[in-house]
Amino acid sequence: MGHSEGRLDEREQQVWRTFHRMRNQLALALGQSLQQDSGISESDFEVLAALADAPDQTMRARALRTELHWEKSRLAHQIRRMEQRGLVAREVCVDDQRAPLVRLTETGRDTIRSAAPAHAARVRELFLDALTPDQLDALHQANAKVLARLHRNCPAETP
Amino acid sequence: MGHSEGRLDEREQQVWRTFHRMRNQLALALGQSLQQDSGISESDFEVLAALADAPDQTMRARALRTELHWEKSRLAHQIRRMEQRGLVAREVCVDDQRAPLVRLTETGRDTIRSAAPAHAARVRELFLDALTPDQLDALHQANAKVLARLHRNCPAETP
């Protein structure tokens, strides 16, 4: 490993903390905007966006979980609450009763359609436009490399 | 703005989605390791680490919220559950009863001490070591710029 096992040095801590803070603060800012503009959370938005992109706007709960990379309990809780608000509907799949289907409702479709433009503008304002094109490329390359490392590390995570 | 308002172009989407996936997958992987190695969640770890760094290992709930950049309801819920497990204790502050203090307990201190080395090793393995020193610098610079933009955008967020 070449480092003192189990402790980040000063530079490593700086890099990690900045990433971590940025991640948390960006999530908070985007979440607050979504709430204000559209009455939904970032988690609601993630689920709605994934379903809106899926064929028949329907996904198995398991596929949704793989797509979003959430803990099972988090997704179950989230889906239950979204169902209560009429944003999604659950259906038992005839082929496999243990793998319920989650479907976007008409309310859910209207919600994501009206929320998406303001959210995209906010992502651009707070994240994309903060960087020069070169910085954006460098950031993207680095993020893609970390993502590749994560996939190598958890092959079972990919469907 | 110079872009078509309210829609990300293909490149913007690619950059945003890669960041977003990386963020979610890294959080999931780190969370699973913490759970396995130490029986705590990433949220538990964040609270314990913030308190461990604070003078007297005690913080006002409000300061903790500013430090972590969480929604108020999320922090309240988290602190309640951590109190039940004996990781933190809440104390009413004599000066200002509306601003409760959160204190690290001995159990909390033991937990963060035993969790930190494995967590640091995992952060290095999945994140820091995935990148060359130049890429790490570029990533850090970009993240710091986004963070600065977020601060400019929400001056009320800083204490």
Image: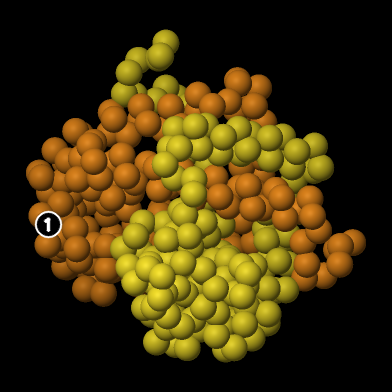
Chain colours: A yellow, B orange
10 Å neighbourhood of mark 1: few (<14), some, or many (≥20)?
few
Quarter of the image for residue A53 reads: bottom right
- Give x and y (percent) for residue B137: 63, 27
Q: With respect to residue A129, does A106 lie above or below?
A: below
Q: Residue at x 16, y 46 (%)?
A: B108
Residue under numbered circle 1? B85
Give the chain letter at badge 1. Answer: B
Q: Is A42 positioned to the left or the right of A80 in the image? A: right
- Give x and y (percent) for residue B132: 60, 21
Q: Is B84 positioned to the left or the right of B99 in the image? A: left
Q: With respect to residue B105, does A80 lie above or below?
A: below
Q: Residue at x 68, y 61 (%)?
A: A123
Q: Residue at x 47, y 88 (%)?
A: A86
- Give x and y (percent) for residue A149: 52, 32
Direction front: furthest residue: A95
Figure quadrant of the N terminus of chain A: top left
Given residues B36 and B136, the one toward you in this image is B36
- Give x and y (percent) for residue B73: 35, 72
Instruction: Kindly tell me whether residue A67 is visible in this rendering.
Output: yes
Q: Is A75 positioned to the left or the right of A57 in the image? A: left
Direction top: furthest residue: A2
Query: Which kind of residue does numbered mark 1 sit on?
Result: Arg
Q: Residue at x 39, y 87 (%)?
A: A84
Q: With respect to residue A84, does B124 lie above or below?
A: above
Q: With respect to residue A64, does A103 lie above or below?
A: below
Question: Helix, strand or loop at disc 1?
Answer: loop
Instruction: Kindly tell me whether residue B75 is visible in this rendering.
Output: no
Given residues A78 and B128, the one toward you in this image is A78
Q: Is A158 positioned to the left or the right of A141 in the image? A: left
Number of callouts: 1
